[in-house]
């Protein structure tokens, strides 16, 4: 299995739309529209085109030539501008193949060098045990827990805050 990270391009509209409409949303933010339309994909790809390397690092996760996920580090604003927030998603059929363990260090290294951040934060819903493990495996430390911090599909969850320093 050949895994690579590559920059998103404006030509990735259909691949992005397919990914966002088929990914498991159990532990994802609600800010991603569903269903995910052509207009949503165009807006996001244009934002990425203007922001990549400045306000964030945005990469497609490609396996054997097919887009199967997305990973990003978005630099925070104001007094939090030295912190980047890590986010990722992967189609379920590619879970448990070590893909995230392979790409997380790559995107973190790239983000530390290009975004002028000195830390990367990941916020993980308490029941998302796979994300807890992959972050710990890649050098992130559990820094705290925000109790009853998020609501998703009517369920209230604690959020675990992980951090990685440059």
Image (cartoon, grey):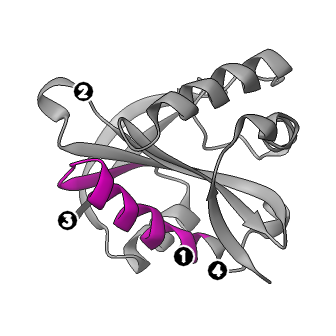
In this view, the mark in front (4 or 3): 3
Which residue bears the numbered disc 3? 166
Q: Earlier in the sequence, mark 2 or mark 1?
A: 2
Q: Are marks 4 and 2 in contact (CB under 8 Å)?
A: no
Q: Residue at x 80, y 84 (%)?
A: 1
Residues in magenta? 100-124
Residue 28 found in image quarter: top right
Q: Residues within 10 Å of mark 4 (few under 14, many from 20)?
A: few
Choose between 83 and 47: the one closer to the eye. 47
In primary-sequence order, the first of circles 3 and 2 is 2
Residue for point 57% across, 67% down: 130
Residue 101 bears which disc, if any?
1
In this orientation, which residue lies closer to the viewer: 63 or 136?
Answer: 63
| Apparent side of residue 17 relative to residue 69 in the rendered image (left or right) | right
Can residue 90 be seen here? The reply is no
Closer to the N terminus: mark 4 or mark 3?
Answer: 4
Query: Any mark on residue 77, and which?
Result: 2
Cα–Cα span, label 3 and label 2: 18 Å
Residue at the outermost bottom position: 1
Quadrant into which the C terminus falls: bottom left
- Kindly report the distance in space between the C-alpha atoms of the residues bearing marks 1 and 4: 5 Å
SS class, disc 1: helix
> Main structural element of the magenta stretch: helix, strand or loop?
helix
Q: Residue at x 47, y 40 (%)?
A: 52
Q: Position of residue 144 (x, y in %)?
A: 23, 52
CB-based contact (under 8 Å), mark 1 and mark 4: yes
Compare residues 106 and 46 and report the one nearer the observer: 46
Q: Which residue is mark 4?
A: 98
User: Which element is circle 4 on?
Assistant: loop
């Amino acid at each position: 299995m050949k895994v690579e990270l590559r920059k998103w391009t404006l030509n990735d509209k259909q691949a992005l739309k397919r990914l966002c409409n088929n990914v498991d949303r159990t532990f994802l933010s609600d800010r991603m529209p569903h269903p995910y339309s052509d207009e949503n994909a165009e807006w996001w790809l244009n934002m990425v085109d203007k922001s990549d390397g400045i306000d964030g690092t945005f990469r497609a996760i490609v396996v054997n030539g097919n887009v199967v996920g997305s990973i990003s580090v978005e630099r925070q604003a104001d007094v939090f501008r030295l912190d980047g927030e890590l986010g990722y998603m992967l189609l379920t059929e590619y879970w448990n193949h070590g893909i995230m363990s392979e790409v997380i260090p790559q995107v973190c290294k790239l983000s530390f060098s290009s975004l002028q951040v000195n830390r990367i934060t990941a916020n993980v819903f308490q029941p998302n045990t796979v994300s807890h493990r992959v972050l710990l495996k890649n050098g992130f430390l559990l820094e705290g827990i925000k109790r009853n911090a998020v609501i998703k599909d009517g369920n209230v969850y604690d959020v675990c805050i992980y951090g990685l320093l440059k």
